[in-house]
Amino acid sequence: MKLLTHNMLTSKCLKGVTVGYPLGIVAKDIKVSEVDFNSEFIARIIPKLDWATLWKAAESIGHVGELPQTLIQDFETNEEFLKKVHHVLLEVEVINGDLLCPESGRKFPINDGIPNMLLNEDEV
Amino acid sequence: MASIQLRKLEEYLQQLDGFEKPKVLLEQYCTSAHIASHMLYCAQVQFNDIEGHTVADLGCGCGILSLGAKILGASHVIGFEIDSDALKIQSQNFSEMELFVEAVQCDILQYLPGRFEKYFDTVIMNPPFGTKHNAGTDIKFLEIATKLASNTVYSLHKTSTRNYVLQKAAQYGAKGKVIAELRYDLPKAYKFHRKTSVDIQVDFIRFELN
Ligand SMILES: C[S@@+](CC[C@H](N)C(=O)[O-])C[C@H]1O[C@@H](n2cnc3c(N)ncnc32)[C@H](O)[C@@H]1O
């Protein structure tokens, strides 16, 4: 699971959970690999992100690097900044661990890089 | 322009493994490499909907559509799939290709409504058509797809339900256009079919969101 995907996941589907966002991350295995950089794509995806969630997630797994805590202005043209975002969004990957519902504490396991958001019948 | 030829794409996709023990209830049959490559190639070359785009694959199974989208240059692909066994095969398929596609395990009908809205540029899928017990699953997938996508949805539907599908899509704010009619070979795994396989007519439809 990349942090780009984490940014979108919630546990709102659980019975009794009202926001379910952002999910905490307990990372047991993290992989960092090189991914081709496409500045246009990163610039286009940033407005869709919850920046605070991205920053916190990256920090919590020890990969925040030099990412600023608040989104800078004019990021579209700032190649260096876009590269940092690219790294955090696409190059850092949680292979094994858990996602945690912020309200109920329910764990969603991440195995082999795949978060499992399936629910039991009594949870919906 | 696509960076590789159609024939090459089909060759790549042919190497992928399919379902080991297809689960009939989940309607697990793979899109053939032939159909998958033509769908994706068309989406890229005619409409420029793949390269540099975010793509979702609903019911990604063993990952043939996701991987094809990735090969054609999609920037970020997420496959959504309910079944662990399918996801295992998908992981194996991807590791052999050294290409990266994300996956989220979930029940699409339960988990996706209200999430990832308009997050993806393009959604591609070969949805379960629905059987006697769960008629209209493809329509439910389509409704979700139209919420996830900001530009286009590519999907397969039975030709016999074409008018209904297009009408439903219009309700969801998507204008559908049939791009090709295919003969689709539903495999022998389907025990309730007496013949070893049955050909059905399937439409390949491109839905444009306004
Ligand atoms: C017709 S197969 C297509 C598989 C693959 N996309 C392909 O093109 O080869 C439909 C897939 O949807 C999955 N599926 C069915 N119902 C689902 C649901 N409610 N949530 C998530 N996936 C589902 C099945 O497990 C199966 O892999």
Image: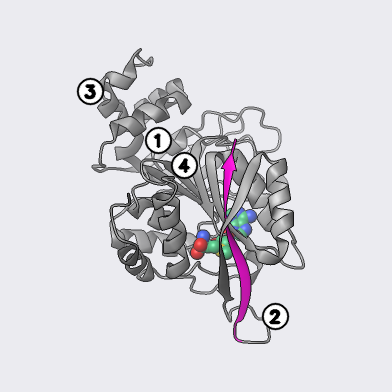
* Amino acid marked by disc 3: Glu
Which element is circle 4 on? Answer: strand
Callout 4: chain? A
Give percent across and percent down for residue A109: 49, 46
Callout 1: chain? A
At x 60%, y 35%, the residue is: B210
Callout 2: chain? B
B42 vs B77: above or below = below
Q: Nearer the viewer, residue B181 or B34?
A: B181
Give the residue pinned by disc 3.
Answer: A80
Q: CA distance from mark 2 to mark 4?
A: 40 Å
A63 vs B59: above or below = above
Give the residue pinned by disc 2.
Answer: B192
Q: Which residues are magenta?
A: B196-210
- Same chain check for tags 1 and 4: yes
Q: CA distance from mark 1 to mark 3?
A: 19 Å
Q: Examine the rendering and report whether any part of residue B163 can be seen.
A: yes
Q: Nearer the viewer, residue B87 or B98?
A: B98
Q: In the image, is residue B89 part of the stretch drawn in magenta?
A: no
Q: In the image, is residue B203 part of the stretch drawn in magenta?
A: yes
Which is more foreground, mark 3 or mark 4? 3
Q: CA distance from mark 1 to mark 2?
A: 43 Å
Give the residue pinned by disc 1.
Answer: A3
Give the residue pinned by disc 4.
Answer: A98
1 or 4: tag closer to the N-terminus: 1
